[in-house]
Image (cartoon, rainbow, N blue to C red):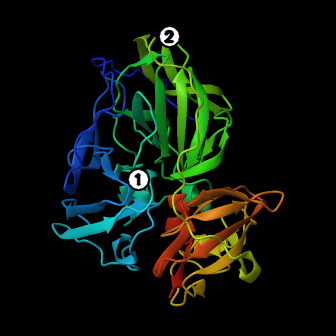
Amino acid sequence: MNRREFLITTSVAALAPRVTFASTPTELVAQPVSAQILPDGEPATPMLGFNGSTPGPVLRTRQGDVFDIRFRNQIDEGSAVHWHGLRIDNAMDGVPGLTQDVVKADAEFAYRFPAPDAGTYWYHSHNRSWEQVAKGLYGPLIVEEATPPDVDHDLIVMVDDWRMTENATLADGFENMHDQAHQGRLGNYARALVEPNTPVRRGDRVRLRLINVATDRIFPVEIEGIEGNVVALDGMPLSALQEPSGLILAPAQRADIIADVTSSDQISFIFPTQDGPYRLGEIAVVGENTEREPSEISALPANETAPPDMDNAVSLTLTMEGGAMSRRMMQGMMGGDIWALNGQSGLTDTPFHLFERGQTARIRLVNGTRFPHGIHLHGHHFFEVGAENNLGAFRDTTLVDSGETRDIVCVFDNPGKWLLHCHMLGHQAAGMKTWVKVT
Ligand SMILES: [Cu+2]
């Protein structure tokens, strides 16, 4: 990682012994903001944000409750908001050109939908997202369980990277072809943004909701100072809890961890790189919780999902093509798209597949390129098929390495037009997207 050396510190506020949440706003206003991305003492960075900040405000609701939020666009180009991972009405999905018209500068759009699944989600711009998300148009969206797990702190940890100039401005060149043909736009400065950033006590039980909000960077994350389990991926509870070590988050992926604080000093978020560990951030540990009785960490209650019908599943293949050192690169040099899915770039007139509502599909994702891709399906979650042909984690974004093939199984039970694309947003910008239709 080409990085500037910064000392990354978190500020320590007053001790907050119990979970408290700011109320969710009824309006999201996209606007230019100034953000202290670099450490205190360095200049603030001109960016885009919601309601005056990047990340935007934490949106929280209870499972089943209706989200009712007015989006007002006060940036100088069109935008729209996508509610990543939520299985909602197609008209609310926030994809200009597919599910709605772009929300022009100074215009508004009313988003209203029930939140069906408890878990950790996020919202972000879905118009020119490779630039608008890179500039900061995103925030966390939390849907609480009817009975939330017993924790002392519920903390959101967004990992991101930024490509900073020496003047603490974001480097431009958001559509740089070299970036798009390789791993996308990678930053030279990375951080874990913790919300709320309050100290915890040794012995506290914490819920950490990790969200990779970077446009293109895959973050392996090692967490020091806790002992616990991964309890959910991409919002959806795991039936078999996993060890947090070796956790890898592709862009847009999430992981919920419930753990006990074992350090008396700090919880550290580490990004292991070829050059050694890069410290993304810390949560301070102050004092000790002596009252909490030791107890097992148990699985979260499952969200309601349709069981796949494997006997009648349609089999499909989606082959990723293009990028640097591929034949398609020539097209890129001539102004065409660098990436393709099944030989097609961008949104075609006909969908990748037309599903009957409720149909189960097994889709083979074949990565014949030299780069990893994080494939995201809108409006649905899908099972990752494991090595023993078992149905694994239930996700909305799956990371497929270079040369790798991964099968996913999805019940297409949400009617509408849904985007299916690489969530390395530089790849999406250069053609790596298609869509499906469910009738
Ligand atoms: Cu990709």
Decide: few, some or many residues near mark 2? Use Cα within 10 Å; few <14, some 14-19, many ≥20.
some
Q: In this view, does 362 lie above or below 175?
A: below
- Residue 78 visible: no
Image point 74% across, 57% down: which residue? 402
- Residue 184 visible: yes
Percent position (x, y) of residue 364? Answer: 73, 71
Q: In this view, does 211 lie above or below 308?
A: above
Percent position (x, y) of residue 193? Answer: 40, 35
Between residue 304 and residue 346, name the one nearer to us: 304
Is disc 2 placed on a helix, strand or loop?
loop
Between residue 309 and residue 363, name the one nearer to us: 309
- Per the image, the residue denoted by label 1 is 122
Image point 69% across, 67% down: which residue? 408
Q: Which quadrant of the view contains residue 199?
A: top left
- Cα gap from disc 1 to disc 2, whole angstroms: 31 Å
- Per the image, the residue denoted by label 2 is 264
Left-right relation of 282 to 102: right
Q: What residue type is labelled 2?
A: Ser
Between residue 120 and residue 164, name the one nearer to us: 120
Camera-near label (1 vs 2) is: 2
Left-right relation of 329 to 150: right
Decide: few, some or many residues near mark 1? Use Cα within 10 Å; few <14, some 14-19, many ≥20.
many
**Answer yes or no: do the residues labelled 1 and 2 have beta carbons within 8 Å?**
no
Percent position (x, y) of residue 180? Answer: 56, 60
Left-right relation of 381 to 242: left
Q: Which mark is residue 168?
A: none
